[in-house]
Amino acid sequence: MGGENKHTMSRRSFVSGVAGAAGGAACSGVVTAQAEGGGSIDYGGWLDDVGYWGEETTDLTGQGTATVEVGGQANNNLSFDPVAIHVDPGTTVEWEWTGEGGAHNVVADDDSFTSGSPVAEPGTTFTQTFDEDGITNYYCEPHQSQGMKGAVAVGSVPREQAAQQESDPEDLGVPLQPHYVGIGAVLMMASSLVFVFYLLKYGESPHTKGGNR
Ligand SMILES: [Cu+2]
């Protein structure tokens, strides 16, 4: 039992070490918004079919401006880069055409804006200012079915269930230990009860039987 407890302790230290490392990464300005508190931003499944997306939101909060390439390298230039950005309310986002991947445009999924007809010219720009908190999903009309989609998250936004990376090792490791300890204790109690039961019932039976005959 003492060994089990020591094992549990070392698991805990390991887990807090991992959590500490994750916290350090967050402080050093990693571009994912995931580490900011809460889970990753929830785009309601809009980006689920964007296979080349690394599921990371580029955190551009505190920047005042944001630029998204239209015709980024990923997906044979049929992509927005970054795919998903997080900005403060009032930020003007500028889309910049790289000239790669043919003619593109930028169309909000809720029809709140469009850059107009698809164009291919490098250096083309389109800007849109986002004042309200929330998520705006958008796409490129000619290439939507090929996964050319993006999203802008503004201010306070819905998050997926928090802290998966921290709670997973704990769920797998620590609660299992007391579980086994508990089973062991129950087995030990059960076996000693059985032992005592047999001792009481049959322990002196030869003498008892002998005495009765
Ligand atoms: Cu396109």
Image (cartoon, rainbow, N blue to C red):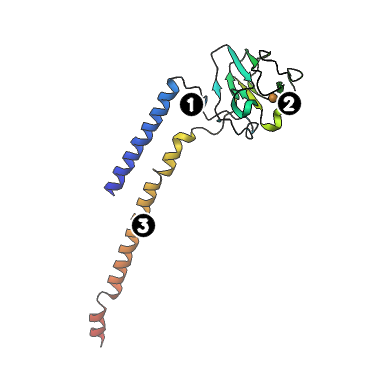
- Residue 35, compared with residue 67, is above or below; it is below
Would you say the beta carbon of the disc 2 residue lies within 8 angstroms of ligand 1? yes
Counting from the top left corner in percent of width and height, residue 74 is at: 59, 27
Q: Quick check: can you spot residue 156?
A: no
Bin the neighbour count of mark 2 within 10 Å (Cα to Cα): few under 14, some 14-19, many 20 and up.
some
Residue extending farthest to the right is 117
Counting from the top left corner in percent of width and height, residue 159 is at: 57, 29
Figure quadrant of residue 84: top right
Which quarter of the figure is the C terminus placed in?
Answer: bottom left
Nearer to us: label 1 or label 2 = 2
Q: On the picture, is 208 further left or further right than 32?
A: left
Amino acid on which disc 3 is placed: Val
- Residue 123, compared with residue 183, is above or below; it is above
Which tag, 1 or 3, sits closer to the chain's start? Answer: 1
Q: Determine the quadrant in which ligand 1 lies.
A: top right
The answer for how far apart the CA atoms under marks 1 and 2 are is 33 Å
Rendered residue at 36%/32% (across/down): 17
| Residue closest to the eye, 192 or 157 | 157
Q: How many marks?
A: 3
The residue pinned by badge 2 equals 141
Counting from the top left corner in percent of width and height, residue 191 is at: 32, 63
| Residue closest to the eye, 75 or 125 | 75
Q: Which mark is residue 186?
A: 3
Which tag, 1 or 2, sits closer to the chain's start? Answer: 1
- Residue 17, compared with residue 92, is above or below; it is below
Figure quadrant of residue 20: top left
Nearer to us: label 2 or label 3 = 2
Contact, mark 1 vs mark 2 (Cβ under 8 Å): no
Amino acid on which disc 2 is placed: Glu
The residue pinned by badge 1 equals 35
SS assignment at label 2: helix
Q: On the picture, is 203 further left or further right than 170?
A: left
